[in-house]
């Protein structure tokens, strides 16, 4: 994967360099084609899977415009968090652009449900996210099943960016029979057996899985194509509900408006190309 700067109003665009004519896939909600175990974008035959961690890092670091060049159908998993992507952006630097930054401001509550689980966007100052879960596992009970934070670069890096994706040992065999999570392991996910965390070293945060759900939500909501002004709340939400929530917001014209901040400028990566051996970056996180 190579990250490159982009012109104002370009947005984040994925480019499949391994395919003929190198198709471009914009990082927008209307290009979501799958939400199983992650968010996948697509156009025609081109697909890019697991985009949420990189987009989450872009949102956290204030990157509005970037080209993401890939030689395959999935963003590298690295350690299962967004911390390596944050490191890449920090090393490149973010350059302020002259174009005013646009936001999506929520004007009325929008809510979607799936069984007992739900996700909602409502009006609010700034951008606040809160997640509440209902995982029946001893490790979750010890760490708590809720977390809320007011979005800022500092809060994102400190509270959210290092939280790794997670899974349960009893689910692995079933997923692999269906061709899912084939590259998953203790190097890029937190794994729970029936009683404890299997990973050596344990959790990075007491409620790391809950914080990772917020990491995912930041990335999924960034598929609006612009930063959000409002409040995100959910109970047991995941990629599917997040995608439905974004689509529901966009189709209800009375529920949102576009706001342009003249004082706030869009941001793009500073260096003209930041390519690296990403496995070595994982060791720094």
Image (cartoon, helix red, strand yellow):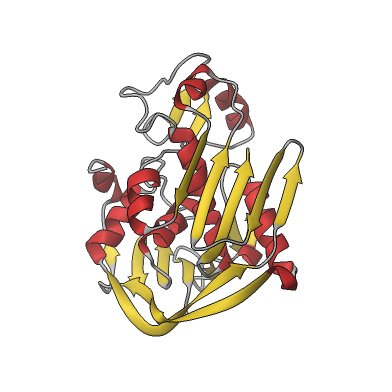
Place residue 244 in its image quadrant: bottom right
Q: Position of residue 226 (x, y in %)?
A: 52, 70
Q: Camera-side residue: 136 or 69?
A: 136
Place residue 275 in its image quadrant: bottom left
Q: Camera-side residue: 137 or 30?
A: 137
Q: Could you tell whether 150 is left or right of 32 in the image?
A: left
Q: Could you tell whether 268 is left or right of 24 in the image?
A: left
Q: Could you tell whether 120 is left or right of 140 in the image?
A: right
- Residue at (25% x, 67% y) in the render: 93
Q: Is residue 170 above or below residue 256?
A: above
Q: Is residue 282 above or below residue 203?
A: below
Q: Is residue 255 above or below residue 276?
A: below
- Residue at (40% x, 45% y) in the render: 160
Q: Quadrant of the C terminus?
A: top left
Name the residue at the front extreme: 125
- Residue at (29% x, 75% y) in the render: 95
Q: Position of residue 276 (x, y in %)?
A: 26, 57
Q: Quadrant of the N terminus?
A: bottom left
């Amino acid at each position: 994967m190579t990250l490159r700067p982009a012109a104002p109003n370009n947005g984040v665009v994925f480019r499949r360099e391994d395919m003929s004519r190198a198709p471009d896939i914009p990082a927008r909600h209307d290009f979501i084609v799958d939400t199983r175990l992650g968010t996948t974008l697509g156009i025609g035959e081109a697909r890019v899977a697991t985009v949420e961690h990189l987009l989450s890092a872009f949102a956290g670091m204030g990157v509005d415009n970037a080209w993401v060049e890939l030689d395959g159908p999935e963003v590298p998993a690295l350690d299962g968090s967004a911390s390596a992507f944050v490191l890449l952006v920090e090393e490149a630097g973010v350059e302020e652009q002259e174009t005013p930054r646009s936001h999506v401001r929520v004007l009325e509550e929008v809510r979607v449900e799936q069984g007992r689980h739900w996700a909602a966007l409502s009006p609010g100052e700034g951008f606040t996210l809160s997640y509440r879960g209902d995982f029946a596992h001893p490790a979750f009970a010890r760490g708590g099943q809720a977390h809320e934070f007011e979005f800022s670069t500092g809060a994102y890096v400190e509270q959210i960016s290092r939280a790794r994706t997670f899974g349960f040992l009893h689910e692995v065999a079933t997923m692999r029979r269906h061709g899912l999570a084939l590259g998953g392991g203790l190097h890029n996910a937190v794994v729970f057996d029936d009683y404890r965390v299997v990973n050596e070293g344990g959790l990075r945060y007491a409620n790391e899985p809950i914080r990772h759900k917020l990491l995912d939500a930041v990335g999924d909501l960034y598929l609006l194509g612009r930063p959000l002004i409002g409040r995100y709340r959910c109970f047991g939400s995941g990629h599917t509900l997040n995608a439905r929530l974004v689509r529901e917001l966009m189709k209800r014209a009375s529920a949102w408006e576009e706001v342009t901040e003249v004082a706030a400028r869009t941001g793009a990566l500073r260096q003209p190309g930041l390519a690296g051996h990403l496995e070595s970056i994982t060791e720094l996180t």
